[in-house]
Image (cartoon, rainbow, N blue to C red):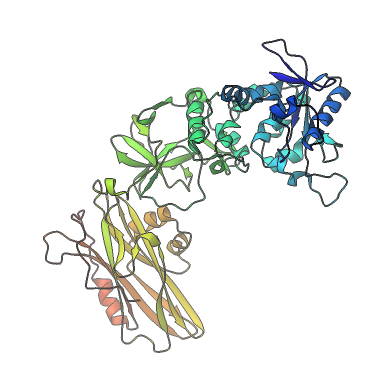
Amino acid sequence: MRLINCRELRLEEFIGQNIPDYAILSHTWDSDEISFADFAQGQSARKGWTKITQTCKLAIEHDFNYAWIDTCCINKSSSAELTEAINSMYTWYAASRVCFAYLSDFDASNRESSFFSSRWFTRGWTLQELIAPRLLQFYDSSWKLYGSKEKLSGNIAQVTGIDEQVLKQLELRTNLQELLDAIPVSRKMSWASNRQTTRTEDIAYCLLGIFRVNMSLIYGEGEQAFVRLQKEIISRTNDLTILAWKTETETMPWDHFSILAPSPKEFSNSGSIVLSQDLKYNPDFTITNKGIQITAALPIHRSMEMPILSLHCHHRDTPDKPLGIYLGNIGGGVYSRATPNLIATEKAGARSSEVSVFLSIHKQRAGNPAQSALFQGQNFQFKTTVSPLFPWNATFEHMSTYPEKRWDKEFGFRAKDTQAFVGMNTYRVEWPNDTLEFVVACGFGPGIEPWVCINNHGSELWYAANDRDSLRVGEMGSKSQNEHIVLQSRMQRARIYVDVEIRPFYGGHNEPRWMQVEVRVNRKRKLFRIRHKRRHQIASQYLEGYLEGSTSQKLLT
């Protein structure tokens, strides 16, 4: 470890236990920093030297003869030295007698300058520099003392999400490492969820010390660095909250994703997660060449037949709602993460017996051509029939479709290549001074025959469709299968009768080629009553074969 001799402004190297007490600097890098090579050339008028001289001045004022600064104490031209330094950095900050946090963009004398708006609170590397030192003092752009970590701990905890007791280790005389070990992995990940690094890999490397792991540095590997970090963490703990992440990106139930998060930002909603039981009662899980192997009893979400893996944790304010993640079966005893934009709440019900399964760490999609042959899904051809007796002063239109990527406006939903599907269409009947809306949903799943249902604006189905919640729509739609509604316009004193029917289409083939969904809009009650009495049964077997060519029937909107 190299340290700056603060009185002579020269570097000295120390090995093993023979390291003197030292101060350490925490800062964000500027454009004119002094490197190891620059320092060897001697002091100059460059702006970067101010940080060095001011740090040394403060160290001497605190009765320390040595200081460490990352810009000039590491020879970054040596990959071996850089790897050792990054793996040791958390320890170096923790071993320092005092840490000076210099906020170059914060002026305490300026009322318009905000302490928590400083870049220092957004950078990845400064997270460990905030946590590790027992004594940390903040200095503004003029090197004036603003306050200490302990005195500002309440506000810092509120802004950063870091547990306040972690920030008050000096006052509470706590063992920081024992405290960090007791905090769930997902909660520690959440501390880094809103932080950035210049290089993609550094968002993983800056967390090494917090999780007590060591890794080789491979710049150029991109997001794979964070995947490697998670693997290292898994090798050291059976804390399942490492899987308690969610993405803000909208996903479909039939898409398959890695069980591991792509970055810390996916843990932004995990700041209040606590363990539901001691880790010694958690199942063991290990990394294999087939994925993460774990033995677990999987509760079943009956509507979409998606297993939920219990993570044995809950949010602090909802202990009665244990958390889990949805899994998608991709065959061979391997499961992927399904609907990663959702964290499941476990429900009471039957569980499978404990089985050993593998959780994929590779991103896979059911719609990939290489995998499409594994699934025998369904296509839904949509046809809309509007009666000639429809009110002359009203209009009927198709408003929206979800998921759009599965919608063919010349046909309907194409979902032949997937094992589960939920589709939703919303429609509108509009008069000059009144508007009525409704939703039509359809779908299927493993063990669930093709279904269709309809409901008015304001119904649970409507709200679920409006939220694009495919799981909830699938659960309600496959159970209710409501096939008719009445649209009542009080302003126009008119009623519109709408019913929906699903039936297989054979087209001269022995096996059904697709499912036909017909939406009929009529003003007369007679046809509606006939429809109400004659309810068609949906198909009772999986359809086989692929859609061939185009159809002569088109969606009328």
Where residue 170 sits in the image (x, y, percent)? 77, 25
Spot occupied by residue 538 in the image (x, y as percentages of width and height): 24, 61
Q: Could you tell whether 267 is left or right of 438 in the image?
A: right
Quarter of the image where the N terminus is located: top right
On the picture, is 85 further left or further right than 440? right
Quadrant position of residue 383: bottom left
How many labels, in total?
0
Does 207 sit above or below residue 420?
above
| Residue 532 appears in the rendering | yes
In the rendering, at what x and y percent does residue 65 appear? Answer: 83, 18
Q: Residue at x 32, y 48 (%)?
A: 366
Q: Residue furthest bottom?
A: 392
**Residue 148 visible within the image:** no
Residue depicted at 51% across the width and 84% down the height = 433
Where residue 148 sits, quadrant-wise, is top right
Locate the C terminus and report the quarter of the image it occupies: bottom left
Is residue 405 or residue 166 the one in the foreground?
405
Instruction: Using residue 28 as the reference point, say whether residue 349 is left or right of it.
Output: left
Q: Is residue 61 above or below residue 437?
A: above
Q: Residue at x 55, y 36 (%)?
A: 201
In the depicted view, which residue is nearer to us: 96 or 382? 96
Task: Name the one closer to the observer, 494 or 264.
Answer: 264
Residue 322 image offset from top left, x and y in percent: 50, 39
